[in-house]
Amino acid sequence: MSLSKQMQSCIVEANNWMRERANAKFGNDSPEARVMKRRFGPNETAELVGVSRQTIFKAEKEGRLPAPEYKDSTANRPIRAGYTLAQIDYMREVFNTRPYRPGHTEPVVLSIPGGKGGCWKTATAAHLAQWLSLKGYRVLGIDIDPQAHFSMYFGYHPEINTTAGDTVLPFMLGDKDDLSYCVKETAWPNLDIIPSHLQMQRLESEIEDAELEYQPHQMLQAGIDGIKDHYDVVIVDGHPDLGMGTTNMICASDVVLIATSAEVNDINSTCQLMGLITDIYGENGLETTHEPYVRILPTKLGAAKSSSLENLADMRAFWGAMPLKNGVFHTDEVGKGQRRMATIYEQADSSERSTPAAWKRATEIFDAPFKEILDEIIKPMWEDEE
């Protein structure tokens, strides 16, 4: 067998494996087949909705909310089945507790670039998008990484069910007037996505010669501006490089959180990304409309006395307040979630969670930095506009 045929055979076998896994879990391999099995108990629901559980029960009795669903049980009294995220979202509408951005404020465009692969930028971006949706915000995730790993978290696979026409590429090369053609729904209420595809790598070689309404480095910003009013937060995930895609992502962002795993070589890669930002906004830089708010998001942190925490201490020493107070600690639950085709925030019960303790720890790992991002970065931007 020739090398070319061997490689093609490997690709086919891997794609068949991915299809079989999706078929076994969801019935078919389309993004539309994906469902969230997770249900939330009364206490969790009350916290997410922003009312007491007694208020929810009262509304159910009065008919303002649908009657609760119950599990099939042999217990002496019926056991509530819990609430889906869609039901929780409806409760927010009934009780007028949707946490949308204040009127007359702009959506926040947030990107999580990384100087190298393996820094957990994509895992963090995908989980942040889901966490914000869980809290009731309207989120758009945009994937411009040709590897499309962010897209795969939501069932959009570049080798199976996605084409270049489903991405931002046609708009960024001047073939479409806006990005509305490529916005896709996900299994998450209020969380849409623009997927990516391997063909996105054409951007680097073709955008400079394309006939465009805007400058090449401003095309993504122009596209986002045309659709962002439907959302509270737009999250962009890109490829770990210093090319035109990353330049577009930075120029489009209000907030740039540089994912930096606390390893010596990764710190150097972050410095290279900082160099790109310096070139964009320096005295002889590109034409831009604004400067983003830039911070460092420490990732893949280890246990006490690990080298990663020593490196983080050094980062705080030479970068001052640039690193967030809360970093993302390493957990194998991210990889296990990919295998189960259910992220930490999607996992429903013991059939999808390793153990209750492992799942709780994994959610806490992401909850802490995400709460800091929302409360100390995103919300203050809305408050400054009022």
Image (cartoon, rainbow, N blue to C red):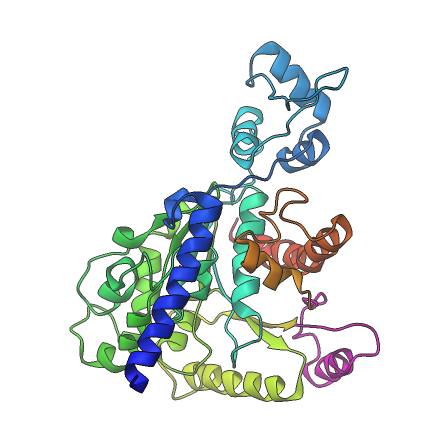
Q: Which of 369 and 375 is in front in this view?
A: 369
Q: Residue furthest top?
A: 62
Q: Nearer the viewer, residue 255 or 142?
A: 142
Q: In this view, does 114 lie to the left or right of 29?
A: right
The region drawn magenta spans 300-329
Q: In this view, does 253 lie to the left or right of 208?
A: right
Q: Quadrant of residue 147?
A: bottom left
Say if the magenta span includes residue 307. yes
Where residue 287 sits: x, y (%)? 34, 77
Q: Residue at x 67, y 66 (%)?
A: 328
Q: Which of 92 and 162 is in front in this view?
A: 162
Where residue 72 sits: x, y (%)? 64, 22
Say if the magenta span includes residue 185. no
Where residue 29 sits: x, y (%)? 38, 50
Q: Which residue is drawn at 55% across and 41% down?
A: 136
Height in image: 61 above or below 254?
Answer: above
Q: Quadrant of the N terminus?
A: bottom left
Can the viewer see residue 140?
A: no
Q: In which quarter of the image is residue 60?
A: top right
Q: In this view, does 241 lie to the left or right of 160?
A: right
Can the viewer see residue 215?
A: yes
